[in-house]
Image (cartoon, helix red, strand yellow):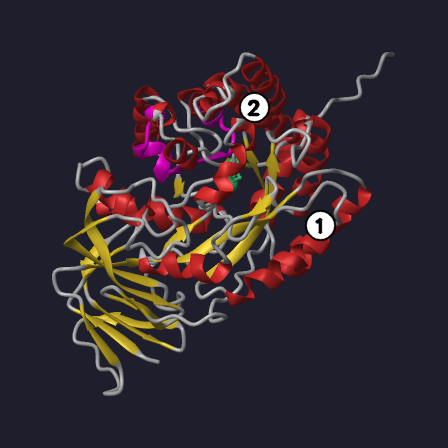
């Protein structure tokens, strides 16, 4: 299928200019004015609209088995919903059970994700440690195109990685030239607070944020950052939700450490008052970790994004419907953690970022696509509009409006945390690998058309880092 996008304004992270874009065989083949293209090419009239790189959501959990159930959104419905919102790639997570071989879990996720209709890739979680885990990490990096390993510092007695696991996995990742990522919350602190709150009779969703105070996130962020400093490798903190964690990132970056931070659209736009709602279904639908926070933290997160201390935006899309959330009716610790948003992220970021003047359109492109592509080493194949890049493009109508609702969204969940919010600025067309996947409300997708993205390791960065790491290692001092 060949497509020409005419009359739009191209926006990348570095440049804004007016030109046509011609795509064929899944690639951007030409950019220029009055392009001469085959008469068979489908023409998209983008006048008055922006032509931007398709969104990349670096944090989703399609059909995740978690907390005794399985997320309701599968790889087909979830990637389709992403395309409806202008997101053309996701990076999901392989999460092995403790003692499960990484490669076995990886194969399970690759099988489940075959029905994806957008591009997809995987971070692989390290949830336990022995030598076979280190060996599988090598296979994943060298043969499967995995360049990032995830660590959950929370979820004790399930998938939590303790300091020993973190140390071993970080050390191995450095050898392999892979980046490490962390869910930073002190899992022991959360576990103890959960027990205490239940004993006190606080069993409803209002107990959820009380069991996960900002300090628990700040402590874990600092621990992960310090461990990465000593071992000497880059670190990416997922879903930074507090000023506490952000301050640790800023400190480390000012000290010259390569630390990156991701923020969720939900954490920027929803505050902790949702947990006080007396309607269990409503409050439980917002139970995710880390929880939604106070306005003070939200303001700090916006500033972090604007200043570049936080580089990426994501959703942590992890859907559980009301009957699944009901598992925690009498005990908030049993409510499956997760909320949705893969379809809404770009619209919410544009409306509350660009339309408010917090972000320029170029900065919007950086935080919704380009920075993720760079950090996870798929740039410029993804994350920009240039000749030779994959034809993953969103045509964005900055004047179009829409009111978000569970009744009209494409996400496979019976709730939307942004319910009733009106956005201005929506995807009119989404092109994924050169195929027109979404046109003004019409999804044109088929299961299995998505492409698995291999992400190479970072040998150059790591050569430099290993030199720095060597300086941080204990020295043998002669006692002569
Ligand atoms: O509540 C959340 N975030 N659920 C998904 C797992 C995780 O912590 O990312
Ligand atoms: Zn998490
Ligand atoms: Zn997550």
Mark 2, residue position: 220
As drawn, the residue found furthest toward the bottom would be 39
| Identity of the residue drawn at 56% across and 44% down | 461
Depth check: give the residue in front, 76 or 456.
76
| Identity of the residue drawn at 40% across and 41% down | 312
Depth check: give the residue in front, 300 or 92.
92
Q: Is residue 152 above or below residue 444?
A: above
Residue 378 shown left or right of residue 49 in the figure? right
Mark 2 vs ligand 2: CB below 8 Å: no
C-alpha span from label 2 to label 1: 24 Å
Locate residue 21, reporting x and y percent.
26, 70
Q: Can you tell which mark lies on residue 451?
A: none
Residue 151 shown left or right of residue 213 in the figure? right
Locate residue 446, reporting x and y percent.
43, 72
Of the 4 image quadrants, the one containing the N terminus is bottom left
Depth check: give the residue in front, 419 or 443.
419
Locate residue 150, reporting x and y percent.
59, 41
Is any part of residue 337 visible from this angle? no
Residue range corresponding to the magenta coloring: 252-273
Mark 1, residue position: 102
Look at the numbered disc 1 and give the secondary structure of its residue: helix
Query: Dividing the picture into quarters, in which one does residue 261 lie?
Result: top left
| Identity of the residue drawn at 72% across and 40% down | 98
Look at the numbered disc 2 and give the secondary structure of its residue: helix
Is 401 in the magenta?
Answer: no
Depth check: give the residue in front, 276 or 98.
276
């Amino acid at each position: 299928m060949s497509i020409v996008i005419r009359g739009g304004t191209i926006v990348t992270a570095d440049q804004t200019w007016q030109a046509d874009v011609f795509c064929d065989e899944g690639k951007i083949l030409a950019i220029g004015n009055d392009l001469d293209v085959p008469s068979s090419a489908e023409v998209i009239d983008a006048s008055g609209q922006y032509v931007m790189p398709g969104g990349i959501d670096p944090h989703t959990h399609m059909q995740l088995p978690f907390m005794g159930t399985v997320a309701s959104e599968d790889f087909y419905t979830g990637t389709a919903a992403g395309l409806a919102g202008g997101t053309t790639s996701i990076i999901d997570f392989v999460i092995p059970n403790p003692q499960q071989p990484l490669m076995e879990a990886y194969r399970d996720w690759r099988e489940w994700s075959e029905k994806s209709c957008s591009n997809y890739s995987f971070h692989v979680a390290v949830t336990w440690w022995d030598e076979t885990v280190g060996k599988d990490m090598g296979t994943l990096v060298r043969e499967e195109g995995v360049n990032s390993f995830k660590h959950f510092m929370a979820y004790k007695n399930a998938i939590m990685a303790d300091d020993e696991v973190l140390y071993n996995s970080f050390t191995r990742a450095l050898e392999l030239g892979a980046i490490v990522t962390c869910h930073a919350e002190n899992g022991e602190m959360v576990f103890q607070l959960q027990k205490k709150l239940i004993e006190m009779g606080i069993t409803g969703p209002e107990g959820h944020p009380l069991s996960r105070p900002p300090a628990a996130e700040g402590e874990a962020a600092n621990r992960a950052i310090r461990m990465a400093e000593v071992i000497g490798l880059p670190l990416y903190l997922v879903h930074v939700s507090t000023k506490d964690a952000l301050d640790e990132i800023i400190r480390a970056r000012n000290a010259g450490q390569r630390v990156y931070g991701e923020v969720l659209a939900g954490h920027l736009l929803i505050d902790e008052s949702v947990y006080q709602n007396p309607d269990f279904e409503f409050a439980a639908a917002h139970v995710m970790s880390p929880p939604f926070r106070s306005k003070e933290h939200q303001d700090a997160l916006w500033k972090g994004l604007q200043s570049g201390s936080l580089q990426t935006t994501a959703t942590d899309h992890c859907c559980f419907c009301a009957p699944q959330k009901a598992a925690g009716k009498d005990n908030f610790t049993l409510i499956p953690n997760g909320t949705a948003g893969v379809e809404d992220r770009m619209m919410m970021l544009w409306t509350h970022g660009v339309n408010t003047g917090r972000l320029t359109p170029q900065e919007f492109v950086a935080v919704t696509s380009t920075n993720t592509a760079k950090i996870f080493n798929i740039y410029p194949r993804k994350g920009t509009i240039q000749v030779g890049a994959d034809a993953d493009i969103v045509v964005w109508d900055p004047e179009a409006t829409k009111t978000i609702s569970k009744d009209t969204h494409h996400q496979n969940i019976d709730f939307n945390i942004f319910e009733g919010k009106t956005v201005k600025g929506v995807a009119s067309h989404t092109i994924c690998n050169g195929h027109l996947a979404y046109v003004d409300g019409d999804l044109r997708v088929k299961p299995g058309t998505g492409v698995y993205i291999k992400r190479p390791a970072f040998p150059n960065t790591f050569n430099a880092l290993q030199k720095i790491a060597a300086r941080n290692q204990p020295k043998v001092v002669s006692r002569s």
